[in-house]
Structures are given as structure tokens and as C-alpha cells.
């Protein structure tokens, strides 16, 4: 109830929450109270969580920030949402996002833009901008986000919160609306690495309904939080640091390096040679997969239906023309193009080859170091409206985050400083497959 009151007071200025249902939230809270009384609680029982609007939860609107799904009520609950609910967590509501998770600023939602709580004239990052803004504004102690090319880590950085994108396959994608299936991964966002570890314990787990879910022994992600960093080898990728790194971000990298050294870590210069190919490869693969994933939204099986039409072709075409926003249409067209006969080999196959090289780059780097340090974004949160005119410029701002999704590796973003203008700046740590406990350990030590 307290969080709902806070949301009522502060959400209008920020627009983090887009679908609230106080009765449902309070009914879940009531059940949590009963569990606390009966002694069947866990550490998370009764803790509220904000859920990104691309996760299904039975009976709630799951709009993905799109007019297409404005009236879609989920008929079932996503595995990851069920997992946290099984611990007695309480859904506070659905939070805003770029339409179908396509974007880096949370400005493409049909439900309006979300504002950065640190400065309302700036974006919160994206696509999980609602999740990050909700945690930053204390309108939720925790949030669920999804990361296809940085959408947990970059908004976490822009809003001064912590977010982890786990190894691909650790959290089931069942019930998370697909953007680019081979890149999508859910993960927790919260104030601290410690909170993220606790949440990841609840979220991770095998699920036979997701064919890419990994069957592994249960891990305790809290276990290594307090390990000392003595002797830890931290890789500094030269391709990420040279060139036009913004002065505020460069200063924050240096401060983080100094802090890590003071805690006993040792810096290693590394090279991720394929970095220049990351953005092109990512935007070919992500749009290709999106174009097929979004074909189901035709107004027949799902989604918006037009009022008037004269033929079946017109019916499909108007449903999609009216239901999707500009950025989603642009990506469906790009994806369809790179998959089409005659261009498939030149673009799609080539991008898959580059994806392998990017993965190999990381494997070579992890021979030399235990974790890699990288900025989360080339700048602090941009001003509202400054990125929307030039989509390519916005795509380029994903340079530090998308490589990890191409390789399926885990990464965490932690608050590490502030720009001259008082906006938060985040640093990322990358790890090898299944190195979540190590990343959480390092993040916890430098927070
Ligand atoms: N900004 C990237 C994109 O637009 C990443 C989005 C995401 O991770 N969902 O594709």
C-alpha cells in the first residue's frame, strides 16, 4: 500500500508505471502477509517488484509498450514472474519500455515517454527505462527487465541503479514476449548487487517450456559477495577506451580502475578486435529475428484490429500499419530485407559469422583476465528528444552493450559516478559463461 501511495504521488511526473491494478497487487500482498504469519516465507516474501511490460502475468495487460497489444490480457504467467511470485514477491504493476523493447531511450512507447528521475529533461535509457526509473525513484525496491542488446545494463547505468544480464539460458524466456530470441535474456534490476544476487537466486532455473533453458545445478548467487578482490585480473579493452570517449565517462572509468586497484585487483590490457563489427552484426541479427517474431501480431491471432477494411489483405495491412509504431516498422522492414532472397548471404549469414568472431574474441580475452571492465554507455543519459531524429546515431550508442548478447555472456552494470551535470554514470563488468557469482562479487565490493 505504501508503494502504491508513492506511485500515485510521483508516477505522473516520471511515467514509469503504465499498467497498475491496485486490487491485484493488494491481493498478492495479502497472501504474502499470510505466508509471513505461517512461517513459510523466504527473504523475498512481501517484497514488491515492478515488472517490465513484456512479461506475461495472468490477468494483467501485457502491452510491450505498443498500441498493438494495448488490450492484450495475458492468459498465463511467465516462468520468471512465477518464480518470484513463488517466493511471495508482489507485482506492483507493469512498467514502461520502448515498443517491443526496440530502442535505447524509452521514447518509443505508445504510452508516452518515461523520464529520468535524476533530471526530468533526460531519458532514463532503454528499453527497460520504466524498470530503471521505478527503482531509481524508489517506486519499487526491485524490477524485472529484459536485455537483448543492453536494455537492462544501459538504463541501469543512466538511472544510477544496478542490473545484471545473466548468461543466455539461465532464466527461462517462457512468457517473455520475444524480440530477438537468440539474444533476449531477462534479469533483475535493483539498488545494489546484493539485491540483484538475491533476486537472481529466485529468478534462475530450468524450464522445459523454453528450449534454450539450461539444465544446471542450482547456484547460490549470494555466496561470493564478500570475497576479497586480491589478485583478480580485470581486463581493459583498448577498443572501448580509445577515441572519443566522453570526458565524464572516461573519468569514471579511471576512478573505477583506481578503486579496483586499491582493493587488490590487477589491470590487464586486452583487445576485443572485432568491436567495430558488433553494431552492424547485432542490428542485422536482431532485426531479422524481430521480423519473424513479430509476424504473429496480425490482428487475427493477436493484437490490434482495424475498424474498417475491404479485403483480407487490407485487413492485415491496416492492423499492422495502425498497431505498430515507427521504430518497430523500420526494424521489421530491415529484418525482412536482410532475410530476403539475394540478400540473405550478404547480410544475415555474414552477421552470423561476425557473431562467432565476437564470441571468439571474448574467449581469447578470458584467457588473460577474470572479468572485463567497460563503460555502459558512451555518455550519461541524453536529453529527451535528442536521439529520436537519427536512428543510426541511437544504434551506435549501443556499442558497449550488444557484444555481450551476441556472445551470450553475462554482464552487470553498477553505478560508478556522476557527470558534471549530476547524471549517474554506470560501469559494466563482463564475465565468462556462468560467472554471475564472480560479477556480483566484484560489483558488491566496488559499490
Ligand atoms: N537498444 C538496443 C535495441 O534497440 C537494445 C534493446 C534491448 O536490449 N532490448 O535493439
Image: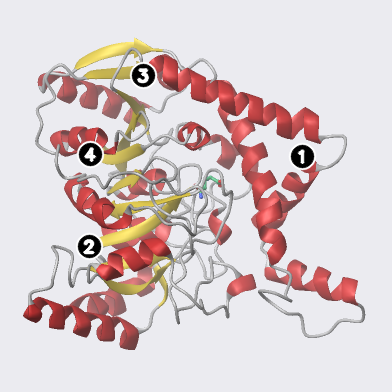
Q: Name the residue under label 4.
A: 440
Q: Is mark 2 within 8 Å of ligand 1?
A: no
| Label 4 residue SS | helix
| Label 1 residue SS | helix
Cα distance, mark 2 to mark 1? 41 Å
In the drawing, does residue 94 fall left or right of residue 31?
right
The answer to which of marks 3 and 1 sits earlier in the sequence is 1
In the drawing, does residue 338 fall left or right of residue 358?
right
Which numbered marker is on residue 366? 3
Q: How crowded is mark 2: few (under 14 residues within 10 Å), some or many (20 or more)?
A: some
The answer to which of marks 3 and 2 sits earlier in the sequence is 2
Q: Nearer the viewer, mark 2 or mark 1?
A: 1
The answer to which of marks 3 and 4 sits earlier in the sequence is 3
Q: Is residue 403 above or below residue 89?
A: above
The picture places residue 140, in percent across and down from the top left corner, at 26, 66
Q: Name the residue under label 1.
A: 338
Which numbered marker is on residue 214? none
| Label 2 residue SS | loop
Cα distance, mark 4 to mark 1? 38 Å
Of all residues shown, which one is farthest toward the bottom? 23
Residue at 56 percent across and 42 percent down: it is: 394
Cα distance, mark 3 to mark 4? 17 Å
The answer to which of marks 4 and 1 sits earlier in the sequence is 1
Q: Name the residue under label 2.
A: 141
Q: Residues within 10 Å of mark 1 (few under 14, many from 20)?
A: many
Cα distance, mark 3 to mark 1? 32 Å
Amino acid at each position: 500500500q505504501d508503494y502504491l501511495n508513492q506511485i500515485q504521488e510521483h508516477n505522473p511526473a516520471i511515467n514509469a508505471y503504465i499498467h497498475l491494478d491496485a486490487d491485484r497487487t493488494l491481493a498478492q500482498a495479502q497472501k504474502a502477509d499470510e505466508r509471513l504469519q505461517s512461517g513459510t516465507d523466504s527473504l523475498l516474501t512481501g517484497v514488491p517488484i515492478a515488472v517490465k511490460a513484456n512479461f506475461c502475468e495472468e490477468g494483467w495487460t501485457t502491452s510491450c509498450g505498443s498500441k498493438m497489444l494495448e488490450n492484450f490480457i495475458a492468459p498465463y504467467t511467465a516462468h520468471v514472474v512465477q518464480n518470484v511470485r513463488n517466493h511471495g514477491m508482489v507485482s506492483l504493476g507493469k512498467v514502461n519500455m520502448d515498443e517491443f523493447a526496440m530502442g535505447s531511450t524509452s521514447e518509443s512507447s505508445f504510452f508516452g515517454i518515461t523520464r529520468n528521475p535524476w533530471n526530468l529533461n533526460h531519458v532514463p535509457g532503454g528499453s527497460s527505462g520504466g524498470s530503471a526509473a521505478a527503482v531509481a525513484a524508489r517506486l519499487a525496491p526491485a524490477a524485472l527487465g529484459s536485455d537483448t542488446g543492453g536494455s537492462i545494463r544501459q538504463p541501469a547505468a543512466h538511472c544510477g541503479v544496478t542490473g545484471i544480464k545473466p548468461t543466455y539460458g539461465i532464466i527461462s524466456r517462457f512468457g517473455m514476449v520475444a524480440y530477438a530470441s537468440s539474444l533476449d535474456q531477462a534479469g533483475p534490476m535493483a539498488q545494489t548487487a546484493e539485491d540483484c544476487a538475491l533476486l537472481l537466486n529466485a529468478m534462475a532455473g530450468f524450464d522445459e517450456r523454453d528450449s534454450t533453458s539450461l539444465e544446471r545445478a542450482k547456484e547460490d548467487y549470494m555466496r561470493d559477495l564478500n570475497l576479497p578482490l586480491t589478485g583478480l585480473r580485470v581486463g581493459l579493452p583498448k577498443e572501448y577506451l580509445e577515441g572519443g570517449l566522453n570526458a565524464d565517462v572516461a573519468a569514471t572509468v579511471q576512478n573505477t580502475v583506481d578503486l579496483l586497484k586499491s582493493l587488490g585487483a590487477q589491470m590487464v590490457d586486452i583487445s576485443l578486435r572485432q568491436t567495430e563489427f558488433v553494431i552492424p552484426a547485432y542490428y542485422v541479427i536482431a532485426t531479422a529475428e524481430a521480423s519473424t517474431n513479430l509476424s504473429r501480431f496480425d490482428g487475427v491471432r493477436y493484437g490490434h484490429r482495424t475498424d474498417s477494411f475491404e479485403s483480407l489483405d487490407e485487413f492485415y495491412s491496416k492492423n499492422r500499419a495502425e498497431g505498430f509504431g515507427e521504430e518497430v516498422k523500420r526494424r521489421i522492414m530491415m529484418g525482412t530485407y536482410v532475410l530476403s532472397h539475394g540478400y540473405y548471404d550478404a547480410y544475415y549469414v555474414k552477421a552470423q559469422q561476425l557473431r562467432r568472431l565476437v564470441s571468439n574474441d571474448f574467449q581469447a580475452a578470458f584467457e588473460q583476465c577474470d572479468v572485463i571492465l567497460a563503460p555502459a554507455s558512451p555518455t550519461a543519459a541524453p536529453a529527451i528528444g535528442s536521439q529520436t531524429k537519427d536512428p543510426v546515431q541511437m544504434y551506435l550508442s549501443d556499442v558497449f552493450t550488444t557484444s555481450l548478447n551476441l556472445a551470450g555472456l553475462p554482464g552487470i552494470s553498477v553505478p560508478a559516478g556522476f557527470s558534471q551535470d549530476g547524471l549517474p554514470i554506470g560501469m559494466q563488468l563482463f564475465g565468462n559463461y556462468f560467472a554471475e557469482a564472480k560479477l556480483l562479487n566484484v560489483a558488491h565490493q566496488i559499490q
